[in-house]
Image (cartoon, rainbow, N blue to C red):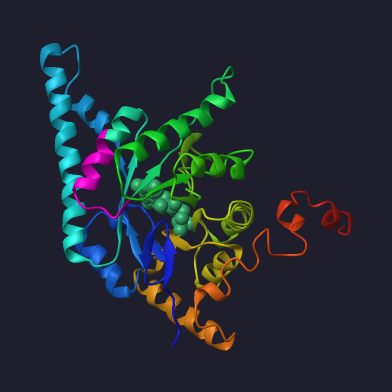
Amino acid sequence: MIDLKTQYAGLSLRNPIIVGSSGLTSSPDRNKEYEKAGAGAIVLKSLFEEQIEMQSSVLMKDEDYPEAADYVREYVKANQVNNYLEIIKKTKAACTIPVIASINCYKSDVWIDFARQIQLAGADALELNVFYMDTDLTHDFDATRAMYVDIIRKVKETVSIPVIMKIGKFFSNTPALVHILKVNGADGVVLFNRFYRPDIDINTMQLVSGNVFSSHSDLGDTLRWTAIVSGKIPGISISSSTGVHDWEDVIKCLLAGADAVQMCSAIYTHGAEIISQVLTCMEEWMLQAKYNSLKQFQGRLNYANISNPGMYERSQFMKYFSNRD
Ligand SMILES: Cc1cc2nc3c(=O)[nH]c(=O)nc-3n(C[C@H](O)[C@H](O)[C@H](O)COP(=O)(O)O)c2cc1C
């Protein structure tokens, strides 16, 4: 009997496949389909503070009716937040697997307010989708790290459900960031979010959207940092995200030390059925390799468990290019 159970950020999952936060998970009915297809957990689409603010400013400009602007803003915000809380409640009512809510804000008092309401609505855990795009030439790097720490500390003081930080890969020292997040209470990290990418259309001379979905080639960074963080920071839960497209990718992430993986682009492309296909193939692989639980191989190839961990730190192609014409 193959056991795919895993522990992730204090949650017990029947298997490590988590449906990643996106439009995929904004409907309770669809979330039920992911559960039926075998998902271990679901991360709901993020509640974006910025989006709420944009919507209220479209409806009402300060100069129109200054005395009414605040009222409309608060009304729009309450309405959007209530809709989100309804999705949590309905998904919880429809599903038995853990439901992880997700928020993206840029003011720490708002993070706290949303987090409190989300816990009351019944979410099993909270993912904080954090990203600051800073292009200021005089920016102090330590200030960015301090912002992340401030957010995790304040949210952890506010809620008792597990809190997971979803970060991007553009840090010079990801393990140092994860370490300080763990010290300040993070129950887990998602490595990594994949953000909107710009592209340029050379015919229309316009800035356009790049490919929204990831590909297999994105998995390398995910594996590298999963392995290094898992090897250097025992005890932090990791869910690998970005570039996980098939069952082999899932096995690779687990070998690198992930407790769970998140799939998004693959589900957009192939539908919920991909989840059951991945689970079936994982079981077959485990059977052949004579494993009957994930624990028997999770982290086996992380930074701490291989004889040449420097391979994970290798960044230049020197040898490759010197041997290639
Ligand atoms: C259309 C789309 C919408 C997304 N929306 C969110 C979101 O609301 N919150 C979030 O944290 N990540 C969001 N993401 C990022 C995904 O959760 C995931 O981190 C990213 O796509 C990388 O995983 P993948 O390689 O499996 O696609 C979105 C991704 C896509 C493609």
Q: Where is residue 46 drawn, in percent x and y?
A: 32, 45
> Which span is picked out in magenta?
113-125
Left or right side of 173 for 322: right
Q: Can residue 186 be seen in this snapshot?
A: yes
User: Going by the image, does 95 lie left or right of 283?
Assistant: left
Residue 193 is covered by the magenta coloring? no
Mark yes or no: residue 212 visible: no
The dominant secondary structure in magenta is helix
Identify the residue at image location x=54%, y=44%.
Answer: 178
How far from the left and from the top, in percent, is residue 88?
21, 53
The answer to if 123 sits in the magenta stretch is yes
* Closest to the observer, 158 or 138: 158
Res 4 quadrant in image = bottom left
Query: Which corner quadrant of the image does residue 219 belong to?
Result: bottom right
User: In the image shown, does 147 or 61 lie closer to the viewer?
Assistant: 147
Residue at image location 53% in from the left, 72% down from the top = 295
Image quarter hosting the N terminus: bottom left
